[in-house]
Image (cartoon, rainbow, N blue to C red):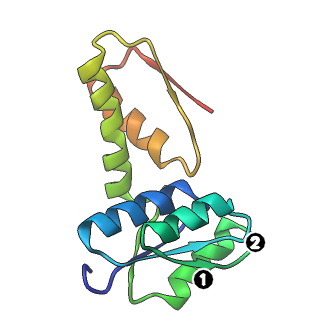
Amino acid sequence: MKQAGVITASAGNHALALAWHGKDLGIPVICVMPSSAPMTKVEKCRKFGAKVILHGEHIGQAKEFAQKEYSHLRYINGYDDPEIIAGAGTMGIEILEQIKDVDVILVPVGGAGLIAGTRMNYMVVSLHSLIYFS
């Protein structure tokens, strides 16, 4: 995987994270982004060293293209991948380590990997807090 690289479809944040860590770890990253993706995110992905392919009008078309045309690469889904969700979920644990008595956590939602992981990991150690998303 390290030599061949990985691929994802994302309109922004997941692509940025993959591009950043790919550069850091020396793993080639291809980000298939829909034409509706913000150009600032497209350019930052390129700046981080990812190959960006603009395809489709929405994320569904970008994902379909990525999985079909690059089936030889590991597809890393930003919202339905157990390892991504688990990694994103460490945020809930970090919050508890820094603030012992948390009543509410606000979580921004794009593809939902962050909210799923945060809630999953956080509920293991604190069932009384509310988690809101926007």
| Residue 40 position by quadrant | bottom right
The residue sitting at 47% across, 88% down in the picture is 70
Position of residue 44 in the picture relative to residue 100 (left or right)? right
The answer to whether residue 10 is seen in the rendering is: no
Q: Earlier in the sequence, mark 2 or mark 1?
A: 2
Q: Quadrant of the N terminus?
A: bottom left
The location of residue 96, given as percent across then percent down, is 29, 21
The three-letter code of the residue at mark 2 reads Glu
Q: Residue at x 58, y 66 (%)?
A: 43
Q: Image quadrant for the C terminus?
A: top right
Question: Quick check: 133 above or below 52?
Answer: above
16 up-or-down from 113: above or below: below
Q: Which residue is mark 1?
A: 65
Q: Nearer the viewer, residue 17 or 7?
A: 17
In terms of depth relative to the viewer, which is nearer, 36 or 120? 36
Q: Is residue 31 above or below residue 118?
A: below
Residue at point 36%, 19% (across, down): 127
Report crowding for label 2: few under 14, some 14 to 19, many 20 or more residues within 10 A (C-alpha): few
Name the outermost residue toward the front.
Answer: 47
Label 2 sits on a secondary structure element that is loop
Residue for point 33% across, 68% down: 23
Side (left or right) of 51 relative to 21: right
The disc at residue 1 is: none
Q: Position of residue 123 (x, y in %)?
A: 34, 27
Label 1 sits on what residue type? Phe
Secondary structure category for the residue under label 1: helix
Q: Viewed as shown, does residue 99 lie left or right of 19?
A: left
Residue 93, percent across and down? 28, 30
Q: CA distance from mark 2 to mark 1?
A: 12 Å
Q: Badge 2 is on which residue?
A: 57
